[in-house]
Amino acid sequence: MPVHLREVVGFLDTTLEIEKFRDFAPNGLQVEGAMEVDNVVTGVSASAELISRAIEQHADLIVVHHGLVWGSGLTHIAGPLARRLRLLLGNDVSLAAYHLPLDKHARLGNNVGLADALALGATREAFGDVRGTALGLAGVWSTPLSRDDAIGRVAGGVCKGQQPRFVFPYGPAVVRRVGVCTGAASDLLEAASNAGCDMFVTGELAERAGDLAKELQITLVAAGHYATEVFGPMRLADELRMRFPGLNVQFVPVPSPL
């Protein structure tokens, strides 16, 4: 049985507590399509490929981490943005996006998903201010690992067995405490060091991050923006299935090496 669009989006808005965040983008419904929702696709970014694949799956609603509206809003609708909107509106498909709320959420979020993928202990502490929110998570392994084994755990838990794309191995030879923050969060490196972390794992790096890691004597690992941010959209798909048993919900991967 179809569920009303507003009921699904309202559930996501409330669950992810979007009113608590001063974000870089508006959270919640960004494009309105059909009011009745049978099929939902979740994904990382609202690319033309994800939208097209969602349409192939007969999606009525797409829920992503990276939406189409950022900053001051839609000021110039042309090129790729126009094509993405044409796909959505031409097929009566809605789009909802959740940025910092989906990074932060204690159960469904990208950061807790990354911490779980690395098997960090259950006791975790928040660190690193992003627009008034402590976004990062720091935790410890039950048994400390060598630096090489710690990097290997990132490879196995996040990078599908491949070596992380960028590693600056400047931290201690034995890794006890690890900080994580998904996406483009290398500017939290100093906060991770101040939180006592031997290693900081994020998605992608600013150029300045390598020198800073060396000066702070912390190991910095960039495992990929996309690879570190699949966890939230996957968990959202599971959450929506449980909350709305009548909906067909699936996570659609559109991998990126970045």
Image: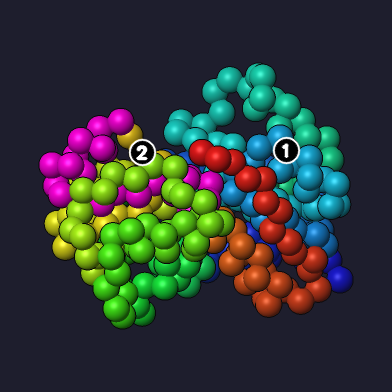
Identify the mark nearer the N-term, 1 or 2: 1
Residue at left offset 31%, top offset 74% = 141
Quarter of the image for residue 55 reads top right
Q: Position of residue 3 (x, y in %)?
A: 78, 66
Of 61 and 122, the residue lying toward us: 122
Range of magenta residues: 207-228
Q: Give the left or right position of residue 125, taking residue 221 as reference.
A: left
Q: Residue at x 51, y 68 (%)?
A: 108
Quadrant (top left/top right/bottom left/bottom right) for the N terminus: bottom right
What amino acid type should be assigned to the residue bearing mark 1? Glu
Which of the numbered marks, if any, corresponds to residue 49? 1
**What's the residue at 83%, 35% (across, down)?**
90
Q: Position of residue 232 (x, y in %)?
A: 54, 60
Say whether residue 155 is magenta.
no
**Residue type at mark 2?**
Leu
Residue 65 visible here? yes
Give the left or right position of residue 202, taking residue 179 as reference: right
Task: Please name the residue that numbered disc 2 is placed on.
Answer: 205
Q: Residues within 10 Å of mark 1 (few under 14, many from 20)?
A: few
Looking at the image, residue 124 sits to the left or right of residue 152; the answer is left
Residue 222 falls inside the magenta stretch = yes
Location of residue 96 with respect to 106 vertically, above or below: above
Disc nearest the viewer among 1 and 2: 2
The residue lying at 21 percent from left, 44 percent from top is 213
